Image (tube, rainbow, N blue to C red):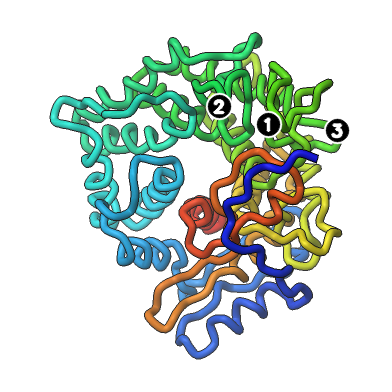
């Protein structure tokens, strides 16, 4: 079997399983003087059960934002990239609830590193990954009205006019020879939430809503298989080393790729009108996916495995960023009526599982563990050998998005 290059530093052993998640978190917090979030039952009574955060509980979103902004300045947090963009989007959600000016000014300082006085942004946008942080441009225009951000955001919108597509209209993962003709489940989150938000802000929804729904439908038609889960990627040309010569599909269900898709489809359903032509197709995709998520959730921890359908293997492990993503998507989907209310219970178990990976250090800063680093398409051995990082932005951003949603439940 083909093996993708492995750049991980280590492959730690399987995490200990068996202790209830709420008790694990309580143990982590013992002696800190901070309260753990109220522990809802793993099986709340009835499908309408809701998560509630008591007033005395730690605000984990502000704790994480304060910790991360203490670790990095807007200059040192990193380049224009989707992991930083994801994290800062989560920071913005926290700002919207708390109205702490420092949270928004931090985002502005980061973005202003890349956007000049005329709104020129020095990015080629030759990959979907490079477009995700464009959400911050839309946010800053909405918050400030500064036309520079509109000009910069339009650069992405205009790039899509010439961006390469598959025969049925799906955006390639990147405009490079190594990614030509390929759809990666990751990619739908990199561009489609930006699209619907751009359309709303700049009165372009007639195009953006239709395009975003089309992308989700095209990707779903190729990547979703029996049982509801999605494969990581599909190659229209069947030339990639990982692609099945008959189906073009990648060999595995990598959890974060599926997580990206799950968040994107909920975001797009939230944005498009009730009578949008592709809405029924997207709802069917999401409902089949939700069934697959329920089936593959680890019954012990409430989290999901790095390779989703192989949780019985001893070297597989539960991953925090995708578990946050699935928790968000199932909770929001149930809240909006996109999926059955029983999935709110699945989300509650996922939330407890993610909280069990959160801790506070002696310095009072948060740490979130077992986050897989950036990952290409590979086989089983490649995925399970990926580095399990702490405080990787993929996990921090997904956590904030999830936590802000769960506070509403």
At horizontal 79% and vertical 67% (from top left) the residue drawn is 300
Location of residue 108 with respect to 100 vertically, above or below:
above
Of the numbered discs in the image, which one, if any, rests on residue 173? Answer: 2
Q: Position of residue 382 (x, y in %)?
A: 69, 49
Q: What percent of the width, then of the height, locates residue 132?
A: 44, 35
Q: Earlier in the sequence, mark 1 or mark 3?
A: 3
Residue at point 74%, 50% (across, down): 307
Q: Are marks 2 and 1 in contact (CB under 8 Å)?
A: yes
Left or right for 384, reference 133 = right
Residue under the point 39% across and 17% down: 159
Compared with 192, 46 (above or below) is: below
Q: Residue furthest left?
A: 117
Q: Secondary structure at mark 3?
A: loop
x and y percent of residue 57 in the render? 49, 74
Q: Residues within 10 Å of mark 2 (few under 14, many from 20)?
A: many
Q: Nearer the viewer, residue 28 or 39?
A: 28
The earlier-in-sequence mark between 3 and 2 is: 2
Q: In front of the other: label 1 or label 3?
A: 1
Label located before the other in sequence (2 or 1): 2
**Residue 233: assigned label:** 1
Q: Is 288 placed above or below 343 here? A: above
């Amino acid at each position: 079997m083909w093996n993708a290059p492995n750049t991980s530093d280590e492959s730690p052993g399987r995490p200990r399983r068996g202790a209830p998640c709420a008790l694990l978190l309580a143990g982590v917090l013992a002696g800190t003087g901070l309260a753990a979030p109220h522990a809802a039952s793993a099986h709340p009574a009835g499908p309408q059960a809701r998560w509630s955060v008591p007033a005395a509980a730690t605000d984990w979103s502000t704790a994480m934002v304060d910790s991360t902004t203490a670790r990095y300045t807007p200059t040192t947090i990193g380049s224009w990239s989707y992991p930083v963009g994801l994290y800062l989007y989560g920071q913005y959600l926290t700002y919207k609830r708390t109205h702490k000016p420092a949270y928004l000014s931090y985002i502005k300082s980061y973005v202003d590193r890349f956007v000049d006085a005329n709104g020129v942004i020095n990015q080629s946008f030759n990959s979907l990954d490079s477009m995700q942080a464009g959400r911050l441009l839309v946010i800053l225009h909405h918050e400030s009205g500064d036309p520079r951000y509109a000009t910069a955001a339009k650069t992405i919108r205009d790039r899509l006019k010439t961006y390469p597509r598959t025969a049925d209209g799906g955006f390639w993962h990147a405009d490079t020879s190594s990614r030509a003709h390929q759809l990666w489940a990751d990619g739908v989150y990199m561009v489609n939430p930006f699209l619907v938000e751009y359309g709303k802000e700049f009165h372009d929804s007639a195009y953006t809503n239709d395009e975003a729904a089309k992308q989700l439908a095209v990707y779903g038609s190729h990547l979703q298989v029996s049982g509801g889960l999605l494969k990581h990627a599909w190659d229209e040309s069947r030339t990639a080393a990982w692609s099945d010569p008959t189906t073009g599909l990648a060999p595995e269900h990598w959890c974060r790729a599926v997580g990206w898709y799950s968040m994107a489809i909920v975001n797009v359903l939230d944005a498009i009108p009730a009578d949008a032509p592709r809405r029924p197709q997207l709802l069917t995709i999401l409902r089949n996916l939700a069934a697959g998520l329920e089936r593959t959730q680890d019954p012990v921890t409430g989290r999901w495995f790095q390779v989703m359908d192989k949780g019985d293997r001893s070297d597989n492990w539960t991953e925090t960023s995708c578990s946050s993503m699935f928790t968000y998507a199932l909770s929001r989907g149930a809240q909006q009526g996109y999926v059955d209310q029983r999935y709110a219970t699945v989300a509650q178990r996922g939330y407890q599982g993610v909280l069990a990976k959160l801790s506070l250090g002696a310095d009072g800063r948060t740490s979130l563990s077992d986050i897989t680093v950036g990952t290409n398409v590979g086989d089983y051995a490649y995925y399970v050998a990926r580095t399990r990082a702490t405080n990787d932005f993929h996990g921090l951003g997904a956590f904030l998005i999830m936590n802000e949603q769960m506070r509403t439940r």
